[in-house]
Amino acid sequence: MKRSRILLILLATVVGPIALADDGLPYLATVTIERGPGAQDLLGERIVSTLHVDAPAKAAAALEDIDGLDVIGVDDTSVHIAFVDRPTVAGAADTRFLENSWVVDFEEQAVRSLAADIRTELEAVPTIDELERYVHDHIVDKSYSRAFDLASQVAASSSGDCTEHAVLLAAMARAHGHHARVVIGNLILESDSGLYAFGHAWTEIHDGQRWTIRDATLPESGTNVQQLRYLPMAILNDEGPGYFMSLLNTMMSMPVRISGVGNPP
């Protein structure tokens, strides 16, 4: 069995069923989410919530590395946090986030061809916004037919879920000289029909001053989406041949349920 298929089975076992959201876009997994008592207002710029995890101390330690997120309590089953709408993983823009790697293999011909195509199409060096849109449009088969492919495989197949969008955008960003990394975490989505949470992957790209969240899976929210909140757990630290173990380790720290979601008192 292909290793990526084994990984998909492992991920589904750890984080729950994969599913398409109401907007038809593929996320890693559905996560049960509940508002706090009386929390009916739209989520503000800073929210509080409780993450129910299998290893609270381990999850809390990982969350200490998130800029814009505060751990306000830990007990035997959960971690209580407060965070802003778009927190990012702490850390400098190291040279490793510019380099070709096993996963973010932008020196492979399939990615190099895409990088050349967008420059030809725009008749200019693309902006980060244009790279995000290009990757979104390039992946026409938005499905679970792939399982955390390398960037070159995504470029060739034009297929995948949020992980493929994140990996290809990281590769395209590095190919154009931007520091970029893949992030694994949760997306909290507030729409006309309710509050939802998904396991998710996206890209952080350094704009020269700070890390910024870029999400090629959904560069523009649907009209029914009122709020989006990102909850990063970690970057994909190991981009080598053993990357699936790094990914699995992060997934095992992710919440199985998010409760008490609301604005701070």
Image (cartoon, rainbow, N blue to C red):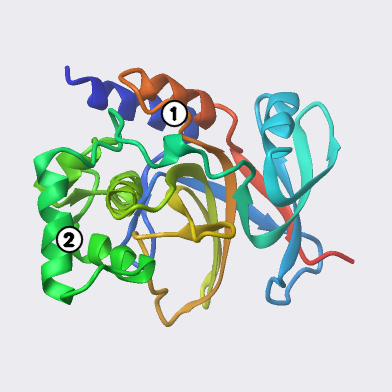
Q: Relative to residue 206, is residue 74 drawn left or right? A: right
The residue positioned 14% from the left and 52% from the top of the image is 158
Residue 97 placement (x, y as % from top left): 43, 40
What kind of residue is marked 1? Leu
- Of the residues under marks 1 and 2, which one precedes in the sequence? 2
What kind of residue is marked 2? His
Q: Secondary structure at mark 1?
A: helix
Residue 81 placement (x, y as % from top left): 77, 48
**10 Å crowding of disc 2: few (<14), some (14-19), many (20+):** some
**Is residue 152 or residue 106 the one in the foreground?**
106
Residue 194 placement (x, y as % from top left): 56, 69
Residue 29 placement (x, y as % from top left): 43, 44
Residue bearing the label numbered 1: 247
Q: Quadrant of the N terminus?
A: top left
Q: Secondary structure at mark 2?
A: helix
Q: Residues under labels 1 and 2: Cα distance? A: 24 Å
Q: Quadrant of residue 75?
A: top right
Q: Relative to residue 208, is residue 29 drawn left or right? A: left
The image shows residue 189, relative to residue 193, as above or below, that is: above
**Is residue 125 or residue 158 the one in the foreground?**
125
Q: Relative to residue 170, is residue 184 drawn left or right? A: right
* Mark number, residue 138: 2
